[in-house]
Image (cartoon, rainbow, N blue to C red):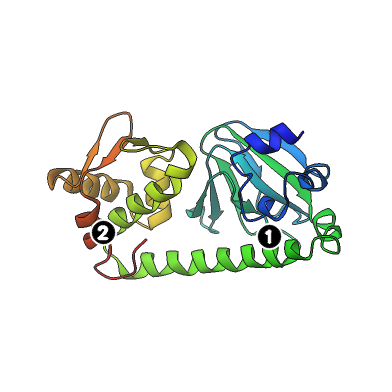
Amino acid sequence: MGLDCQNCKARNSQLCSVFNDENIGDLFSIAHPVKVVKGSYLLHEEDSTKYVYNLSSGVSAVERLASDGRRQIMAFVYPGDFIGISSGPAYSISDRALTGVTACKWHMRDIEALYVKYPELEHRVHEIATRVLAATMDQIFVLGRKNAIEKIAYFLLYIDKRQVKYDGHIDDFTLPMTRSDIADYLGITVETVSRAFSLLKKKGLIELSQNWVVRLMDKETLAEVADHFGPNP
């Protein structure tokens, strides 16, 4: 059990880092390991919010469907990210695996039962909820204040920072999401995503292969493009 936790990509996450190597077993003992294949769902909109999750491996997308069937991707989730905190009785989002995904699943009441022994845990859970809200506000700003090129530049820099902790890349990295996923995250069309990538390639700011492997050739200039209307991603 201890070896599993030590090798887990989420070991140093906000939640798990509350526990040291001697007492991490208290958290793991109430966890339910789950595995989800690519394209399937870790949780569904309207499911009961009694469970929370910490991604251990893989990448997923938090999404929500409008009444007309249109999809909005709210976030891309990487190992160590906490999913499922909600103030209501049912989730307002779904979480879809973009790759094969593993996660630890806890009943929220079991997490709360540890608050007395580990007061910092309650603080961390509230901190995680605050960060989720902050990330949502950042996305609203990006969607409302940037044009398509700026959005794609912002997105690539953001994913580069997130994914380096996941795959340890130095130069090239493979995007786990499709053009459609990116379009639904940034609030633009798939065609606009393709045009924006093509323009950034022509400007020599990125390289992009048919296998969806990307290299950021000039991060400084790319950041200038992304920052035209807002903060550094």
Taking depth in this image into account, of 219 and 185 the one nearest to the observer is 219
Please name the residue shown 14% across and 44% down the image.
204
Please name the residue shown 42% across and 54% down the image.
185
Does residue 126 appear left or right of residue 207 in this picture? right
- Alpha-carbon neighbours of circle 1 within 10 Å: few (<14), some, or many (≥20)? some
Taking depth in this image into account, of 64 and 158 the one nearest to the observer is 158
Asked if residue 175 is positioned above or below residue 220 in the image, the reply reads above
Picture coordinates of residue 3, whole percent (x, y)? 71, 32
Picture coordinates of residue 161, whole percent (x, y)? 40, 50
Mark closer to the observer (1, 2):
2
Disc number for residue 223: 2
Q: Which part of the image, by quadrant, shows the N terminus?
A: top right
Taking depth in this image into account, of 139 and 7 the one nearest to the observer is 7
Picture coordinates of residue 207, whole percent (x, y)? 22, 38
Asked if residue 73 is positioned above or below residue 143 in the image, the reply reads above
Q: Quadrant of residue 149?
A: bottom left
Asked if residue 127 is positioned above or below residue 208 in the image, the reply reads below
Type of the residue with mark 1: Ile
Type of the residue with mark 2: Ala
Does residue 12 appear left or right of residue 117 in this picture? left
Q: Quadrant of residue 120?
A: bottom right
Disc number for residue 101: none
Asked if residue 228 is positioned above or below residue 80 in the image, the reply reads below
Q: CA distance from mark 1 to mark 2?
A: 32 Å
- What secondary structure is found at the residue carrying circle 2? helix
Does residue 127 appear left or right of residue 20 in this picture? left
Q: Which part of the image, by quadrant, shows the C terminus?
A: bottom left
Q: Earlier in the sequence, mark 1 or mark 2?
A: 1
The residue indicated by pointer 1 is 85
- Alpha-carbon neighbours of circle 2 within 10 Å: few (<14), some, or many (≥20)? some
